[in-house]
Amino acid sequence: MIKKDYKTEERVVVDNHCVDVHLICDCCGKEIEQHSYYWNLCTGHYDWGNDSVDSIKHYDLCSNECFKKEVDSFLREGHTTPYVNAETEFYFKRAHMGE
Ligand SMILES: [Zn+2]
């Protein structure tokens, strides 16, 4: 007889952007308005080999101006192997659930 351990399926939903907290622009410090688009920026570089993971930074940015400022100041750090990932996201604050 084959014995199998069936594990119940666990689902953990993690959604950092929909928690009921204020979303603050990492550049100008303004609160990002609900139901608006904002920039999600990630910068980093490979200059430090394995330690390069410590160079990764995430930013929430309220406007094109703040986005440009952060990218610009990152580029001015002058790394030899920089990278930038960026996309706009829609900020939607969910109502409290299960509380
Ligand atoms: Zn801003």
Image: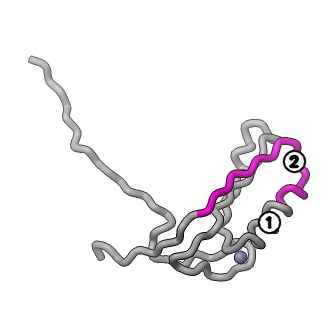
Quadrant field for ligand 1: bottom right
Asked if residue 2 lies in the magenta stretch, the reply is no
Return the residue found at the far left.
1
Magenta-drawn stretch contains 81: yes
Density class for disc 2 (Cα within 10 Å; few <14, some 14-19, many ≥20) is: some
Identify the element where label 1 is drawn: helix
> Residue at image x 13%, y 19%?
2
Earlier-in-chain disc, 1 versus 2: 1
The residue nearer to you, when weighing 56 against 70, is 70
Q: Which amino acid does label 1 sit on?
A: Lys
The residues colored magenta run 74-88
From the top left corner, tell me how far across and down residue 38 is, in percent. Answer: 62, 69
In which quadrant of the rendered image does the C terminus lie? bottom left
Q: Name the residue under label 2.
A: 79
Q: Which residue is drawn at 43% across and 58% down?
A: 14
Separation of marks 1 and 2 at Cα, in angstroms: 17 Å
Q: Quadrant of residue 75?
A: bottom right
Q: Residue at x 48, y 72 (%)?
A: 92
Q: Which residue is at the front of the view, 9 or 71?
A: 71
**Picture coordinates of residue 76, whole percent (x, y):** 90, 58
Q: Residue 68 carries which label?
A: 1
Q: In which quarter of the image is the N terminus?
A: top left
Between label 1 and label 2, give the one nearer the viewer: 1
How far across and how far down the image is residue 19, in percent? 45, 71
